[in-house]
Amino acid sequence: MVWLLNPFTFTIGTRGNCEPIVCAMILWIIICLMKGSILQAAFWYGFVVHFRIYPIIYALPIVIVLDPHFFQSGLRPILWHWTSAQAKDSQIDSEVIDRHDMWTAFKSIFTRERIMFGLVSGSVLFLWTGLFFYLYGWEFLHEALLYHLTRTDPRHNFSIYFYHIYLHYEHELSVLEKLISFLPQLIVQLVLISSLAKDLIFCFFVQTVAFVAFNKVITAQYFVWFFCLFPLVLPWSTMKLKWEGLSCILLWMGAQTHWLMWGYLLEFGGKNVFLQLWVASLIFMAANTFVMIMTIQHHRYSPLFKCLAKSKNSVKIE
Amino acid sequence: METQLFQFLFYQKLVILLIFFFAGTISGMHISASSDELGRSGSSDSKNPDLSTLYVHGKYIMESYLDKFELQDSNFEDFVAHELPSGLCELLPDNQNLVLGLSVLQRTLIGEGSHRHLSSSIRLQVKPESILQLPTHFCEVIIIERLPSGVFADPFELQHLHQRRVFTDVAVFGDTNLELPSFRSNRSIVEVHMDVGSNILSGQQDGSEINILLPLHARYQPLDEGGYSVVEIGEPDLFMSCSAEGKQHKQSCLFRLPNDDAKSRTGAVSWRIPSGIPAHAGFVSTFTYISALLSTLLIVWTSIFCSGIKASKNLKQS
């Protein structure tokens, strides 16, 4: 409840930004999945991707978590009930499940739940897109979707790429350069998904932080995307406020403030501080990386769902 | 029972969402229709038959200019000399110099950084030797600012000023794209209408002083070794539009105001804007990619080797 009073979020929200709506929908999708309402989750997921493109990064973890071990037709999925005593055993259990699934995952990718989720969310996304295309034509399609494929905003923002884009704006960046810029983002997302997908909420959180940090454009409103998930991952963190937690908070906020100082001198002071601003964005990237590393290292990996029926392999290990 | 309740809640949410959607669509279409006077670029809107009915015929003199010409200074002079409708000016002598005098008292850029105000102070004087018998008339001064591509006016900001009655009327024509740098942008024209009161041509008032504070914003400039680019904003073009109630219908007259005194010419206003330095391109690109690579490797290493999964494996082995 205290987190709802986070001044950052309501400042961003009250200036006319729609992020709180998106965050509310993401949280509702998580609740629907936890209740086993795949149809509803798929509907809202299709809608939220139409509303804001970034939740597309959650598609793969959701599909992975719709595992036949957790979701079976007619049965509600079982959530893990976590206590500190259970933590050790359940982690071993989850490790068994993961090793088993990696082998059978390839064979059992296309399950009823996964196909249904994909079809429903895809249809909903297509329908909403089609409706707005009917209302507003190509202008809608360009502004909402196509623009993001070609957009390279050279103006100063938190991203490490802004000055590089500005210095090369007069001659178009080659396909290779664009690919090299996109590769870190892709690699990080895939590795995080493959490591953490079963711990769905923590996976969402770290994915979102990484997505924002490696994006070509970073503005303050994007931070709201992972702020809403932060209270959900906190109970599973072994990080103490003194001094690990405080160091993360102070470093992240300090790097941001440092960047804002140079940004103010450029935009409102009219001083040429592009180089200093770019260095500040590198420091902010380092702070983001530090926070991600600390969060992952101090997190108790906790799969969201329990296996509905014990498999042959898990019996063997026991 | 629980399933029925869940379904009911789901359909309830769907209905609420649809209500909001249609309400939003209707209000959005209304807002886009009423605010479309500002921020239009000349060529695209002429293709939309619905928008043309929103414009009062002859309300903006630049409307017809951009329908016919590109934004070049030579075209503008031709337009003023030959194409500009003069309306029914038979009530006034052929040479308006006998009636009105004009002097631009001051023209400066107020503020620092990328967001400044262009301040123009204009004195309008009716010459006492020519007192005309005219019916009750209302006049407004039309100030045309032909902006270079290095700066732009925000149509939404100007709309707020218009709503607060700072200007009688205001419109922006040409390129109003906020993101593109100046070398990818086109010029724009701001047309400001300021009420100068009634019966000014009858010599009942000595004259009036008009102060205009026009908010402008700098675009990103082409790269420069010196680190700064200078943008010059030329003098405004001034017109007067007077309308009077005739016997049968409203008569209006539009004429260009000549500059009364050559000494009053203030010249172009210079705006020094920071720009990127080409010499930085090499090492900025190199260190940007190195930072991205380093962060990627650290996050990948942490995810694979230091997350909870690995910790639980160690636990099992011990």
Image: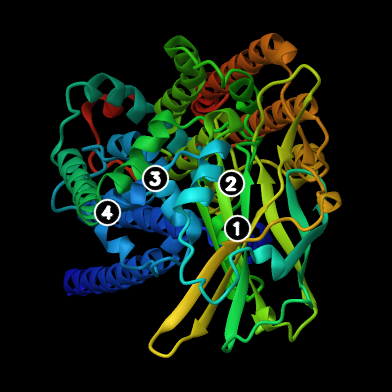
Residue A133 shows up from this direction: yes
Viewer-nearest of discs 4 and 3: 3
Amino acid type, callout 4: Tyr
Query: Within 10 Å of the Cα at label 4, are there few (<14), some (14-19), or many (20+) other Cα atoms?
Result: few
Label 1 with label 3: CB-CB less than 8 Å: no
Is label 1 or label 3 in front?
A: 3
Indicate the secondary structure of the residue bearing disc 3. helix
Q: Chain of mark 4?
A: A
Q: CA distance from mark 1 to mark 4?
A: 27 Å
Q: CA distance from mark 3 to mark 2?
A: 46 Å
Q: Is residue A300 visible from the viewing direction of this image?
A: no
Residues at marks 1 and 4 touching, judged by CB atoms closer than 8 Å: no
Q: How far is mark 1 from mark 3, CA to CA? A: 43 Å
Residue B68, labelled with which disc? 3
Of the residues tagged 4 and 2, which is closer to the observer?
4
Give the mark nearest the N terminus, 1 or 4.
1
Looking at the picture, tell me which residue is in the foreground, B268 or B217: B268
Q: Which residue is mark 2?
A: A223
For the residues carrying marks 1 and 2, which lies nearer the camera in this image? 1
Percent across and percent down for residue B28 are: 36, 66
- Residue located 29% across and 53% down the image: A47
Q: Which mark is residue A136?
A: 4
Residue B53 versus residue A130 in the image, above or below? below
Pointer 1 or 2: first along the chain: 1
Picture quarter containing residue B5?
Answer: bottom left
At 46% from the left and 12% from the top, the residue drawn is A174
Q: Amino acid at mark 1?
A: Ile
